[in-house]
Amino acid sequence: MTTPLYCAEPARRHTAQQLAERFALPLITRRPSDGYWLELGPERLELVTTGKQGAVYAEFVAGAAKHRREQGGGRGQPVAKAIGLKGTDTLPRVVDATAGLGRDAFVLATLGCAVTLVERSPVAAALVADALDRASSHPDTMDIAARMTLVHADAIRWLSTLAEADRPDVVFVDPMFPDTGKSAAVKKDMTAFQAVVGDDLDSAALLKAAIAAAKTRVVVKRPRLGAPIEGVKPSGEQIGKSTRFDIYSIKALRGSAA
């Protein structure tokens, strides 16, 4: 079922129409009485529902994004080390193949990387587009937003169409897996996001496409005790307190296939 878009701010009707057209979202004139919907208010676009679940939105200017931007730890951050930033002066071109709300992509763009955010969910893509629009007009983040390019597409197909000159150095993958009951409880506000966006049940195919497209490495973000994606065995891993990064070195994989 397609998630509708409701414009709660009459002055932003044109923006709502642009979002609806870009992401093929049904634009409705009344707020629904149940279910999930996107709502464009005076400040931002949010995924909302009835009840006590919090609203979900993408944010690159304030809150946690601001804290990570100012005090996140630079290239020492786990995601930065995983993609190979630490110990090099070269900034890789990165494709975030499962952009979600763009949080990891924003960290990498903050550190200077050019990042293409690929997201197939129209809901997630619309939320990121709204956040990028706000970040592009704020003096603290406009330079960072300029390094972020949003592509609304299925990453498996999109990666397979890249010309040689457009292949990224690194492909980053953070698939959303079904909740097995063994993981930590998902925050209430993210329950709505997972319910609407859905699980990535084709992760093995995405990993294969990512390995074919990346020039140097593929990095897969997983829960610390989560199983690796089926198929290709990681050539390395970086383990943190709650997160693990499985690293697939293209050079190592080609060597093993020789």
Image (cartoon, rainbow, N blue to C red):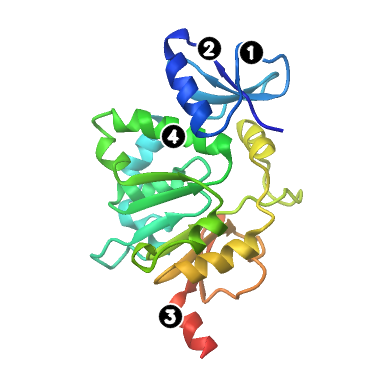
| Label 3 vs label 1, nearer the camera | 1
Amino acid on which the number 2 mark rests in the picture: Ala
Which of the 4 image quarters holds residue 89? bottom left
Q: CA distance from mark 3 to mark 1?
A: 52 Å
| Label 3 vs label 2, nearer the camera | 2
Badge 3: residue crowd in 10 Å (few <14, some 14–19, many ≥20) = few
Amino acid on which the number 1 mark rests in the picture: Arg
Residue 61 can be seen in this image:
no
- Label pair 1/2, CB-CB below 8 angstroms: yes
Which of the 4 image quarters holds residue 224? bottom right
Q: CA distance from mark 4 to mark 1?
A: 22 Å
| Label 4 vs label 3, nearer the camera | 4
Q: Earlier in the sequence, mark 3 or mark 2?
A: 2
Res 251 label: 3
Residue farthest bottom in this picture: 258
- Label pair 4/3, CB-CB below 8 angstroms: no
Badge 4: residue crowd in 10 Å (few <14, some 14–19, many ≥20) = many
Vertical placement of residue 241 versus 213, above or below:
above
Q: In what element is the residue under mark 2?
A: loop
Q: CA distance from mark 4 to mark 3?
A: 34 Å
**Residue denoted by label 4:** 129
Q: CA distance from mark 1 to mark 2?
A: 8 Å
Q: Earlier in the sequence, mark 4 or mark 2?
A: 2
Vertical placement of residue 230 versus 134, above or below:
below
Amino acid on which the number 4 mark rests in the picture: Ala
**Residue denoted by label 1:** 31
Amino acid on which the number 3 mark rests in the picture: Lys
**Residue denoted by label 2:** 8
Which of the 4 image quarters holds residue 31? top right
Q: Earlier in the sequence, mark 4 or mark 1?
A: 1
